[in-house]
């Protein structure tokens, strides 16, 4: 196990030296290609910035207004039937839009229930088993110029549901 930690410390510098060395061997102007790539990346950031700002503002409004807690209370009878803690409904909802906003909810859950509690462990596994669907779709589809998402949203929402169910099952099996 210590060997893996040793490798992880040196893998990033090794990759950088490998890329630069390979570029020099192929007689590619490495620094010019790097600056061209950085310039293209900056253009992508400028293109997606309005979408990101809109997502962040919407999540902030939902969280500050208490709408997420209201949603959790409304569907509490359903979550009770499914043996899913309603306290995690805001987390699952926000995780669909923003991982960083979901991380702040995770910290709130850890402070209130503790990281070693059932809710803390379930929260950790949910964060690992789900994806920021709307953020990812908006960024990648906008960057690639995709106008019709076809079945992507339905598939992504279904996979998120499966991830949440798998998280609940795993948490019950391992820690329950």
Image (cartoon, rainbow, N blue to C red):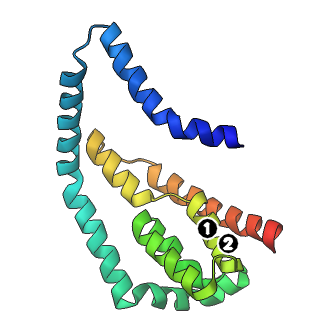
Out of 175 and 71, give the one closest to the viewer: 175
Identify the residue at image location x=32%, y=15%. Answer: 23
Out of 26 and 56, give the one closest to the viewer: 26
Identify the residue at image location x=60%, y=63%. Answer: 161
- Helix, strand or loop under label 2: helix
Left or right: 79, with 146 as reference point: right
Asked whether residue 96 appears in the rendered view, the answer is yes
- The numbered disc on residue 155 is none
Out of 84 and 8, give the one closest to the viewer: 8
x, y percentage for residue 121?
A: 67, 72
x, y percentage for residue 59?
A: 34, 75
Left or right: 114, with 60 as reference point: right
Q: Indicate the quadrant containing the C terminus: top left, top right, bottom left or bottom right.
A: bottom right
- Helix, strand or loop under label 1: helix
Q: Are marks 2 and 1 in contact (CB under 8 Å)?
A: yes
Asked whether residue 97 appears in the rendered view, the answer is no
Mark 1 = which residue? 124
Label 1: how many Cα within 10 Å (few below 14, some 14–19, many 20+): some
Query: Total marks drawn?
Result: 2
Q: Is residue 118 above or below residue 141?
A: below
Snapshot quadrant of residue 115: bottom right
Left or right: 49, with 25 as reference point: left
Q: Is residue 157 above or below residue 114?
A: above
Identify the residue at image location x=58%, y=85%. Answer: 87
x, y percentage for residue 20?
A: 34, 21
Snapshot quadrant of residue 17: top left
Label 2: how many Cα within 10 Å (few below 14, some 14–19, many 20+): many
Q: Indicate the quadrant containing the N terminus: top left, top right, bottom left or bottom right.
A: top right
Identify the residue at image location x=62%, y=43%. Answer: 5
How many angstroms separate mark 2 from mark 1 (CA)? 5 Å
Mark 2 = which residue? 121
User: Seen from this angle, which residue lies furthest top?
Assistant: 26
């Amino acid at each position: 196990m210590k060997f893996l930690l040793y490798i992880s410390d040196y893998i990033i510098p090794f990759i950088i030296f490998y890329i630069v060395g390979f570029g020099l061997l192929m007689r590619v102007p490495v620094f010019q290609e790097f600056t061209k790539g950085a310039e293209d990346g900056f253009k992508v950031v400028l293109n997606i910035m309005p979408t990101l700002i809109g997502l962040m503002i919407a999540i902030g409004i939902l969280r500050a207004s208490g709408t997420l807690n209201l949603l959790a209370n409304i569907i509490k009878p359903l979550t009770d039937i499914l043996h899913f803690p309603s306290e995690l409904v805001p987390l699952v909802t926000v995780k669909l839009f923003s991982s960083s906003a979901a991380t702040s909810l995770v910290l709130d859950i850890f402070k209130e229930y503790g990281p070693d509690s059932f809710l803390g462990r379930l929260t950790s596994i949910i964060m690992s088993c789900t994806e920021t669907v709307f953020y990812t779709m908006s960024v990648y589809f906008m960057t690639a110029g995709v106008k019709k998402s076809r079945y992507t949203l339905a598939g992504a929402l279904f996979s998120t549901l499966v991830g949440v169910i798998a998280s609940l099952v795993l948490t019950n099996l391992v820690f329950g």
